[in-house]
Image (tube, rainbow, N blue to C red):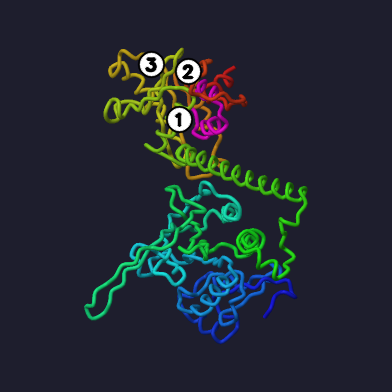
Amino acid sequence: MSSTASGLVPVHIGQPEPGSDRDQALRLRADRPTSLRILEAVDWRRHGLQQRWLGMESSDCAAALSPGHVHNQDDEGMKRLFGGARRRGELALVLTVIGQVDEDRTHNVFGSADASVHLSDLFTSVVARRLPAGTRPSIAPGLSGADRDLAIRLLTRPADDPWWSLQLRGMHLEHGAGSGSEDHLAAGELHPILVDALGDPVVAAWSSPAGDQRWYVIPDGTPWDNVLDWLVHRALPEYVPGALRRARSPFFVDPDLQTAGEQSARQSLEELEARYAEEKQRLEKELREAKEKAEAVRYGLLYGSGTELTKAVAQVLTAAGMRAVDLDEELGGTKSADLLVSAEGASARLVEVKGVSGPAQESYIGQLRQHLDTWPQLRPSVPVSEGVLIVNHQYKLHPSERSADVYTRPEHVASLASLPVTVVSAVQLFNWWRAGDWAAIRTAVLGGVIAAASSAAPVKRQQPFAPQRRWYDRLRK
């Protein structure tokens, strides 16, 4: 089964040949690994590889893919692969998958672990614990060469794909008939490639104590085409170049035979790809943080009511450079409006916040006026003469489907013009906030032109939405 004439590099695959009797038997097993099903669709020749299925000769193979050793299927094939690599003085490469994307339960004997991979013929395993949805790994420090390239490739996995935290573990053996037990410490070393937020590896390479084996542990669901491209173009040239030379693989580029120009261009390309991956990772993290920070305010303003809406309004006003005091906390109970808002150079104002699934009730204005009338009895040292009503009306509808104005009855609209009250919709406030138009927010809430506070970031001024009070004033002219 020589691969020299074909230019294909032989690789051992830890599953039976598709369609064989052995394969049909494995298909009936409920615990058949997802990774094995994925391998069936690989175009091996496109990658310059010759597949050697379970039961075929493996001693001349350059690497093993997802070996079935953990399922007691592949002991002989792996022994011959390790023996052949040892005889040639080469490193034995193994790519193995851990976890199952379509299974989220503990299913082995390792206690809190959700999956495991038995390493070589040692009393050592990599055990895995499935991480929460939304985990975003990062590249482990100090990586270079093929390992760094693999990290960059695996960062392209879809955002909702699962990850597993990896740990090296030894083995405890209980002997029968009361003859005692023995503990075996974990052998070899686990080298992180991608790590989670706690610094624990989610992709790693294990090296054997003798240094003659290197196992890459990758999460289930990883596209094999991406991994095989890495194997042929990065891993084998770095770790087992002899395998490519023997096969006369068209994908092998011998650095010893390259010109200085070729080497320089290749190095520049690799550095560019690494910089791109780092910048992409940084920007994705920046986007996630910005989204997490904005989500509570966005949801509160557009779909919230009660405390949720009030807190979102307070955050927006604070971001615009104003001081917003929660009066329920300050005074105890619901004795006044929701917020007392102030800023240097402007009189303080009471802010009443309402959320309603239908049209806004006209009685909200009366409630705010009552708060203005009783305010001097609560805090006579803090003069307040005007109030602001912020209403999240029709919040069960998408913002684009809501009426633009909080109040639309002409008689009510006309009556508001003479009152010390400004009406602002939560959607208006949201649009100013998302555009960073702090001046529009300060003007709507405190009136006049208020100097920007240092906490409000300067942005390009956009045409603000006019608060309803000023719209009413225009109606009267």
Q: Do the residues labelled 1 and 3 touch (CB within 8 Å)?
A: no
Looking at the rendered image, the disc whose residue lies closer to the viewer, 2 or 3, is: 3
Q: Which residues are the magenta region?
A: 424-444
Write down the residue under mark 3: 384
> Which amino acid is tagged 3?
Val
Q: Is residue 249 above or below residue 147?
A: below
Residue 350: which quarter of the image? top left
Q: State the predominant SS element of the stretch in magenta.
A: helix
Name the residue nearer the viewer: 170 or 39.
Answer: 170
Q: Which amino acid does label 2 sit on?
A: Ser
Q: In which quarter of the image is the N terminus?
A: bottom right
Q: Which of 132 and 260 is in front in this view?
A: 260
Say whether disc 2 or disc 3 marks the residue closer to the N-terminus.
3
297 displayed left or right of 378 = right
Q: In this view, does 156 lie to the left or right of 369?
A: right
Residue 398 appears at what percent x and percent y? 53, 44
Tell me the residue that label 2 is attached to: 418
Q: Which amino acid does label 1 sit on?
A: Ile
Q: Identify which residue is drawn at 55% across, 71% down.
A: 86
- Mark 2 and mark 1: span between their CA atoms? 18 Å
Identify the residue at horizontal 64%, vertical 58% (top origin).
Answer: 234
Q: Name the residue under label 1.
A: 390
